[in-house]
Image: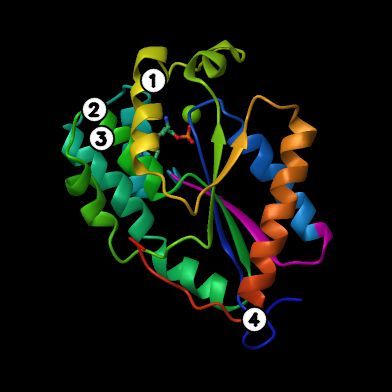
């Protein structure tokens, strides 16, 4: 069910606070879609494997200090360097599940006080997701989950600001899932949402671009 002519893959983005369960759910979703016979890949941003990604990674682990604007543009560059591959994959029929995307870029940087329109500007022209799923969790609940790691941003106070930024940023097209539910319940809801989305893309829904 992939790679045959005009049917393209879907671009599915998962967003949410740190520790909301995105990585767990994206892994399960990958297994599910592959099981249905769909060509599917799991991507994540930041992609720490590139040289830009390594700069980001060292910033996140506080091994380097960067100006807030600078690191914002690095996160964006990290998406731009994957853009053409992303387009090729989608056009050849592969569905991409993406763990964080431009919305994380805007939510985290604007939580630091950067202007939201300034934050959105470098994302213009990237591929727009066919579906954004927000795993909704109160910052306090996320903080209780086995604790945060020690990366930059993984602090309750800051996550509260990020949560507020996401509230400003989201629109009516986002699918909201209560991330405090049992893992299997979230998994089921996600499967239903994504199956619809994959079907619509297979039928020839055109690709679109941010910010749309
Ligand atoms: N993050 C992620 C940003 O600040 N801007 C971005 O554009 C992206 C994609 O990086 N706390 C932040 C959110 C996370 C951190 O991501 C590392 P992850 O998903 O924990 O590897
Ligand atoms: Mg993290």
The answer to the question of whether label 1 and label 2 lie on touching residues, with beta carbons closer than 8 A, is no
Residue holding disc 2: 112
If you read the primary sequence from the N terminus, does the residue marked by circle 3 or circle 4 appear first?
4
Answer with the quadrant where ligand 1 appears in the image: top left
Residue 6, image quadrant: bottom right
Q: Residues within 10 Å of mark 2 (few under 14, many from 20)?
A: some
In this orientation, does residue 173 appear? yes
If you read the primary sequence from the N terminus, does the residue marked by circle 1 or circle 4 appear first?
4
Residue at point 53%, 63% (across, down) = 130
Q: Nearer the viewer, residue 134 or 31?
A: 134
Residue holding disc 3: 110
Compute the Cα span from label 1 to label 2: 11 Å
The answer to the question of whether label 2 and label 3 lie on touching residues, with beta carbons closer than 8 A, is yes
* Number of the label disc, if any, that sits on residue 160: 1
Residue holding disc 4: 7
Compute the Cα span from label 3 to label 1: 12 Å
Residue 193 position in % (x across, y down): 68, 54
In the rendered structure, the answer to whether residue 117 lies left or right of residue 185 reads left
If you read the primary sequence from the N terminus, does the residue marked by circle 1 or circle 2 appear first?
2
Residue 95 position in % (x across, y down): 63, 64
Residue at point 19%, 48% (across, down) = 117
Of tags 1 and 2, which is closer to the observer? 1
């Amino acid at each position: 069910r992939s790679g045959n002519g005009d049917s393209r893959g879907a671009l599915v983005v998962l967003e949410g606070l740190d520790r909301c369960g995105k990585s767990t759910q994206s892994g399960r979703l990958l297994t599910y879609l592959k099981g249905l016979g769909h060509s599917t890949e799991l991507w994540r941003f930041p992609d720490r494997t590139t040289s830009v990604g390594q700069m980001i990674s060292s910033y996140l682990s506080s091994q380097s200090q960067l100006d807030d604007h600078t690191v914002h543009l690095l996160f964006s560059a990290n998406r731009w360097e994957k853009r053409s591959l992303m387009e090729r994959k989608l056009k050849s029929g592969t569905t991409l599940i993406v763990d964080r995307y431009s919305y994380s870029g805007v939510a985290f940087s604007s939580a630091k006080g950067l202007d939201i329109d300034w934050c959105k500007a470098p994302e213009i022209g990237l591929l727009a997701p066919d579906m954004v799923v927000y795993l909704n969790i109160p910052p306090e609940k996320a903080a209780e989950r086995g604790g945060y790691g020690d990366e930059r941003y993984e602090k309750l106070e800051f996550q509260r600001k990020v949560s507020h930024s996401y509230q400003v940023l989201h629109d009516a097209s986002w699918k909201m899932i209560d991330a405090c539910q049992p893992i299997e319940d979230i998994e089921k809801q996600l499967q239903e949402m994504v199956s619809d989305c994959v079907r619509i893309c297979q039928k020839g829904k055109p690709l679109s671009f941010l910010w749309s």
